[in-house]
Amino acid sequence: MKTLEWTLNEYPRPQFVRRSWDNLNGLWDFAFDDQNIGEAKCWYHHGEFDKKINVPFVYESKASGIQDETHHPNVWYQRAVVIDSQYAGQRILLHFQGADYLTKVWVNGAYLGLHRGSSNKFQFDITHFVKLGAANSITVKCEDSKSCCQPRGKQRWHDKNFGCWYVQSTGIWKTVWIEYVADTHIEKVKITPDVDDASVLFEYSIHNFEVHPHLKIVTTLSYKGQLIREVTLKPDRSFTKLKVDITNDTLVEGVHFKFPVWDIGQPNLYDVNFKLFSGETLLDEVTSYFGMRKISIKNGKIFLNNAEIYQKLLLDQGYWPDSLLTPPGEAAILEDIDKTLAMGFNGVRKHMKVEDERFLYWCDHKGLLVWSEFPACYEYNDQAVENFVPEWLEVVEQNYNHPAIVTWVPLNESWGIPNIGVNKQQQSFAQSLYYLTKALDKSRPVIVNDGWEHTISDILSIHDYEELGDVFTKRYQEKERVIKDEVLKGSSRYNFAENHSYQGQPIIISEYGGIAFKSESGWGYGNQVGSEEEFLSRYQAITEAIKKCDYICGYCYTQITDVQQEINGLLTEDRVPKIGLEKIKKINDIRHT
């Protein structure tokens, strides 16, 4: 078999871990179907697969082994999988962490169904379609388009790159894997910490609850190997809750709390083990973790665990030169996080992308804040709304348990809602996203439309690429002028949509900078600089101008790396620093007023 330069072998769902699983990444048979004849010709039985592809890398990428940037609307995958006979009597679940955009699946020629979306994960129960101890054919068709009505983020919809839009990603782009579970098993657990009450709430969903009449769930909490609590719950329905007190006199770590909390740079995490029994028979066992962490807003400031925080974020689009939107490996994820921390940033705004769960796992474990943002549509109509809403809500639900996520951002810069400033229908859509997100998660701030033209929002976030520090200082020195939109008058954008106004929210400059070095090709924001000294002078001037505004609660610098034609990264696409990391850190570490 061909040796693969890029491989993703890590467990793909690190917040909900089971022992029995098989990774299906690697070489698959592959074919383009530009005429869309594959289904009519039953390619799921005997496909005309003339290529090989390295899953989960999209065919547009070098890592896939194909590297064809041409748009192909229909692509097919197929591979044989042997299911060991030891899993007789188990449910066999086929998982996709992400595939773009419409995914259809067959097993041994039997059609299982379809999934619409690109950022949310999904699964199929293939138990009754496979033969144990024998090779089973798994066939996948992915349909993608240039439609602006589907959430596409920074993926281009023209044949060539333009502006800040890059090569599209088609088909499977995250890990594919198989999991083996009991017929009755723990489907999911929603974990909600309550710092003020020193407790944590577990909400369990049990699949096929009715089969076993005498179920019990044993939940074991520990911290650094030390037992905190073990609680047994006998559920009387498929959905049940358990609130657990986490105080323990041996874990006193500070004067504010009698238990360790998750904090910036201090990612104290609790391990938790869930066991599902029928009588004394163990049906299922899952391991997870959580952080005792509280995000709150009061008097125009943001608090983490009841202490005011100043957010120093870095815009992160999550592109790599050889693998595009898919991280080329766990080491690449760690490199980006470690360099972000080395530059003195305490968080990232993950821009226009729902990142690999391993990224969130490491942010959880390294104490790095995350703003979780969704890929944009670029038109507003009924189809766009129908595509956007269910996928966004699934992403919120699926990533809810990660303590690193401190803000939800469904929309950015009025993309997909171009007339929200005056259009009440688009304003209603944005407001509905706010309330739907809050219906799932009451604990985190929500910025519905990051950058400008806010309707209802927990934070007033502003995008401003002014390159001169003194101009920035003058523009923002009077808060009243900012919140009354006088600062931006004369431009085409305002901080608030029509009939909406400032309601005392914290204010953050959530995009600024974007400084690029001089180049014959590529672009950044404002004039390009010719030297490290010139860069640092400008970076320090605008960053300190933000910090001098005592009503501003933080900033987000654009951006961590270059991305294709956009060359305003602190690092190159290959993650080579353009400026000494410690020099950026020194400026970020200067205390704000």
Image (tube, helix red, strand yellow):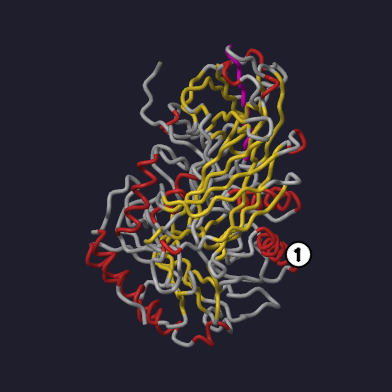
Q: Is 77 situated above or below 233?
A: above
Location of the C terminus (image quadrant): bottom left
Q: Is residue 144 magenta?
A: yes
Q: What amino acid does circle 1 point to?
A: Gln
Residue 108 appearing in the image: yes
State the residue in front, 404 or 585.
404
State the residue in front, 345 or 305.
305
Q: Is 47 situated above or below 409?
A: above
Q: Is residue 179 magenta?
A: no
Task: Say whether residue 412 is left or right of residue 508.
Answer: right
Image point 50% across, 78% down: which residue? 301
Image point 38% across, 55% down: which residue? 366
State the residue in front, 385 or 264.
264
Q: Quadrant of residue 444?
A: bottom right
The total of numbered circles placed on residues is 1
Spot occupied by residue 348 in the image (x, y as percentages of width and height): 44, 59
Q: Is 449 situated above or below 184?
A: below
